[in-house]
Structures are given as structure tokens and as C-alpha cells.
Amino acid sequence: MLSIRQNLFKKVNNWQQIRNLNLLEFQSKDLLQKYNVAIQQFQILDSSNNDKTVLEKFDCPEYVVKAQILAGGRGKGVFDNGFKGGVHITTSKEEVLNLSKKMIGNRLITKQTPKSGITVKKVMVARSVNIIRETYLCILLDREHNGPVLIASPAGGVDIETVAEKTPEKIKTVPLNIDQAIPEQTLMEIAKFLDFKGAAIKTCAAEIQKLYTLFKAVDAVQIEINPLAETDKGEVISIDAKLNFDDNAEFRQKDIFSMDISEEESDHREVEATKHNLNYVGMDGNIGCLVNGAGLAMATMERTKLNGGDPANLLDVGGGVKEDQVLKAFQILTSDPKVKSILVNVFGGIVNCATIANGVVTASRVLNLNVPLVVRLEGTNVTEARKILKDSGLAIQTASDLDDAAQKAVSALH
């Protein structure tokens, strides 16, 4: 029981801080480039007639060809057409074009994508660099320090959590002043901690300052560079970048937020839920769950599991839900072909139970609902809500408590 509670808590707890903006790797690098951060030169191919022209003007001794999707593990991924690897290295422009054609328009499957993969629409072609050393650098907002902190490690290119666990002495955390640039002395200390030598110390210090300027200018909550690499030519280059932004700053960062492609790659049910101020988490079961609040969501899943069922999702309608949102919630629930019964579990505090009842009745009629529906309501205006359900004449099963509701939802599957 504890593991069920812990796993669900991790899911519902994430509802409290949703980072909606997601950028592809080349979009993040483009932002870095605008703030003069040193990166690999790159071009974008999209399988258009311009691809060949783009490559003709991009001369490199060696090219890195990378599929652009919002997922890690691309290098070890497999495409639905059988082609292996979302990252390749070549010296031939003709081969770059061949590789891009095998990627674009096909779905790349990695350990971080859905089982069906994600369609690749663009490919980034970057100048290959000879990396002699990799370090790690991250700037992020940190509650413990009430502001931004810089995290640095000379052990880059690997999972930073593993470094922190096994060799904590290789992690340096430095609180930063949001109103000021990073002092020169601090920059030099960080560069030396990262094991840069000679002229590369000043180069590294300058790159860190540029990254902090970018961090503040774009209202970022995190800029992670892994690796921040040293090349055989003495360059200090941000090879891979992950940027997260403050959603509340969208009105200031319209150009950045306009680049968001999350709708193209996210579960369409999550996207629809977000548009209507609902929270949706998809799962693998067959009982659709509509609740209000993270705590009730956790209890609903726990009781459903204990009674032998498996939730297909958790859909939280929140505290200020209206009847039209209940209809939308049912549309989202029934769009999942795995859903074979629906369990509504709502405690009316701020929520008026009559609003939920009217929404349930309307949704059942509009959608001509053909899966079993179990409703458990308690709290504000519950007597009227139960009367609305009873007088509807619809095949809605009501429940006296959560256990009763879970049992009925599970039994309805058989």
C-alpha cells in the first residue's frame, strides 16, 4: 500500500508546478547563441527543397546529425521504419541528407518516449568538435537559497545525481545575487574548480557570465549545460543545453513561449485538459477517475487498486469547476479506448456537488455514455446533487463512500 501511495503522490504532486514550455535542442542553442554563448555552429533540415542549399553553405570537416524531439536517449533510439539511432556522425554532406531523410517523418522510439515514439519533423546538423574534457554547469532557482544558485562539477557528461551521490566533493554550489553580475573572483574560482587551465580559465569565466545574463534576461528557472566542454583548440563550448522557464513570465517572453511545441508531442488528452484548466495524468488501467484535489486523487487510486482495479487515469477538476468543464472532462475520459468504467469521486468544499451532478448528467446525455458510471459525492449541497442524479433517469450508480464506489466501479468491469 505504501508504494502505491508514494508513486501516486509523486504524480499528483507534480500537478502543483507544471512547466508547460518545452524547447527542442536547436531552439535552446539558438537562444544561447543570441546571448553570445559559445556553441557548435548548426543548421536545421526539415526535408524541404531548401535542405541541399542549406548544406552547400555549411562546410565542416565532420557533422553531427541529431533528430529533434523532446526526449532523451536519442542516440540509442530506434525509428519505426527500422533505422537505428537518432544521432549520427559523418564527414559527407550527401550522407547528412540521406540520414535526415531516414529520420524526418518517422517516429523515434527511445526510453523516454511513448511506446509508439515521437515523429521527427526537424534534424539538427552541427559542426563536430573534438572534446578533450567534459564538465557540468547549471544555474537554477533554489528555494533553500531563496534565489538562483550555480552548481558546477568537473565530472560532466554523466548523470549529475550519480556524481552527487558517489563523489559529492565534485559538486560545488554557489548562491548568486539576482540583481548583480557574478563577481569576477567567483567566476575564476568556479572555472578553476572545473579544472580549466591557463587561458581557458578566463574563457570559462566569461562563458559562465554570459549564461547568467541569459538566465536573468529570459526569466529562466533553470539552465543546465551538460557538458560544458573543452575542445582540442582550447574552446569552451556549451554542447548540450536544457532550459526551463517561469510560466508566470509568459507575458514578458512572448517570443520564447511562441516556440513551444509541447502540444505537438504531448498526450492530446493532457493538452486538452490544460486548455480547460483541468489536470490529467494518463495511466495503464481501465477505470477512468474524475476527482477534485490531489489528496482525493491519491485516495481514489489507492482504494481502486485495493479493490482489484486499475485506474486508466486521474483527472482533477479542481475547486472552481463549472458544468462545461465536467463535460470536457468526460470527453477526455471517454477518448481513451481503455476506459471500461468511470468513477467520479468528489468532495464538495469549494466545489458545489450540484454543479458536478448537473455536469455528469449533461455529459452522460450529450456523449450518449455507454460505459458504467459510478458517482460518489459528499459535501456542499450533496442532498440536491443526489436528487439530480436520481431524477435524471440515467443508469448512474451512486455510492455511499469511497470503498463502495471503488467496489462498484471494479464490479462494473465484469
Image (cartoon, helix red, strand yellow):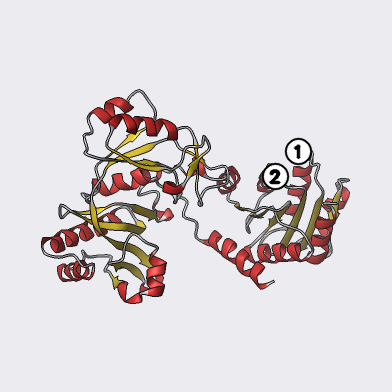
Identity of the residue drawn at 84% across and 52% down: 412
Give the image location of residue 48, x and y in percent.
38, 26
Nearer to me, 151 or 252: 151
- For residue 402, which quarter of the picture? bottom right
Give the image location of residue 359, x and y in percent.
73, 48
Nearer to me, 141 or 118: 118
Nearer to me, 194 or 331: 194
Amino acid type of the residue tagged 2 in the rendering? Leu
Tell me: 351 left or right of 77.
right
In the displayed structure, would residue 169 be above or below residue 200? Answer: below
Tell me: 355 left or right of 139.
right
- Quadrant placement of the N terminus: bottom right
SS type, badge 2: helix
Q: CA gap, disc 1 to disc 2?
A: 8 Å
Q: Which residue is labeled 2 in the image?
A: 327
Question: Could you tell me if residue 385 is visible in this image?
Answer: no
State the mark number for residue 366.
1
Amino acid type of the residue tagged 1 in the rendering? Val
Nearer to me, 341 or 113: 113
Question: Could you tell me if residue 368 is visible in this image?
Answer: yes
The residue carrying pointer 1 sits among few (fewer than 14), some (14 to 19) or many (20 or more) residues within 10 Å by Cα, namely few
The reply to whether the C-beta atoms of the residues labelled 1 and 2 are less than 8 Å apart is yes
Identity of the residue drawn at 88% across and 49% down: 391
Identity of the residue drawn at 88% across and 45% down: 393
Outermost residue toward the bottom in this view: 169
Identity of the residue drawn at 30% across and 57% down: 227
SS type, badge 1: helix
The residue carrying pointer 2 sits among few (fewer than 14), some (14 to 19) or many (20 or more) residues within 10 Å by Cα, namely many
Give the image location of residue 360, x and y in percent.
76, 48
In the displayed structure, would residue 95 be above or below residue 290? Answer: above
Q: Earlier in the sequence, mark 1 or mark 2?
A: 2
State the mark number for residue 284.
none
